[in-house]
Image (cartoon, grey):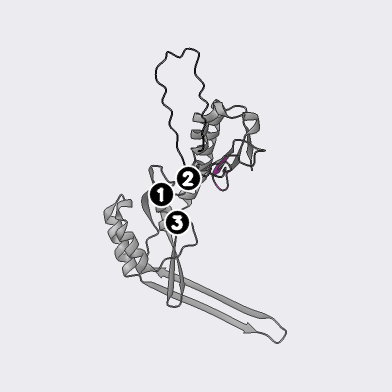
Amino acid sequence: MSENRLNVIVPKDYNGAPIEVILREGEAPVALDPKEPNPVDITGTIDSPLRWLEKRVDLIDQKQANITVDRDNMQISLVDRETDFYNNGVRGVLQLSKEMKEFGINTDKVWDPIKLSKFIKMHRAFFTDKTENMQLVSILKNFKAKVNQDIERSKEENGSRVDNYSQVVDSNLPKSFKLFIPLFKGFACEEIEVEIYADVDGRDVSLSLVSAGANEAIEEYKNRVIDEQLDAIREIASDIVIIEV
């Protein structure tokens, strides 16, 4: 006959009430393997590092943290523990708006006149003047261009050579049109003037959209928004080093 003994420690102030003891038989569950810490790696809007610090600045050693600023890529990055392999990284990025990307303004994107006509028709909401939108759609659908080419080539006995080529295109495209769109994701809409650049090569026509005003505004906004974020960070975490890269 087997005998199982159970040691029960009775508290000093025991009052004599019954003590219930539960015995369970069977194998104990297998303990889970310990896991390494999972560091935070977040990329969000430009104010993400500031929002992180607002709630956690009292939990970090500011002398062991750093912030890097990359103005070319419109990014602010926070590392809360520099020498810790499991440090947390929070990046804030100022992103161009979806509308700027879709229109392809100031990019290498090229449009066929018919495709641009359809796109502009479906994005009439970004035109403050609906009549201008309708006119531009009609012009692009019925694109016309007159091309004058002058070619001069000659070669003399003494080796002198002339090789001149000139092309003049006269089209029905307007000089420019106006859009009312956000420049950055999450920002309010702005009115910008957009020019249409045409590249005519025989029967092939490609169009690109260019806006000097938008480019200037983006540069101005980029620096102002980043500076505003850095000023706010300095107010709540003045000991964190800020490095421009």
- CB under 8 Å between discs 3 and 1: yes
Per the model, the C-alpha gap separating discs 3 and 1 is 11 Å
At label 3, the amino acid type is: Ile
Given this view, does label 3 or label 1 mark the residue nearer the observer? 3
At a point 49% along the width and 50% down the height, the residue shown is: 215
**Mark 2 and 3 residues: CB-CB less than 8 Å, in contact?**
no
The residue that label 3 is drawn on is: 105
Looking at the rendered image, the quarter that the C terminus falls into is: top right
Magenta-tinted stretch: 71-77
Question: Which secondary structure, mark 3?
Answer: loop
Q: Is residue 74 magenta?
A: yes
Please name the amino acid that badge 2 sits on: Ala
In the image, taking residue 57 as reference, residue 104 lies left or right, namely: left
Sequence-earlier tag: 2 or 1: 1
Image x and y of residue 166, in percent: 53, 73
Q: Name the residue under label 2.
A: 217
> Which x, y percent locates residue 73?
56, 48
Residue reaching furthest to the right: 158
Badge 1 is on which residue? 192
Q: Do the residues labelled 2 and 1 touch (CB within 8 Å)?
A: yes
User: Element at badge 1?
Assistant: strand
| Nearer to us in this view, 243 or 213 | 243
Task: Identify the residue at image location x=57%, y=80%.
Answer: 152
Where is residue 221 drawn, in percent x and y? 49, 41
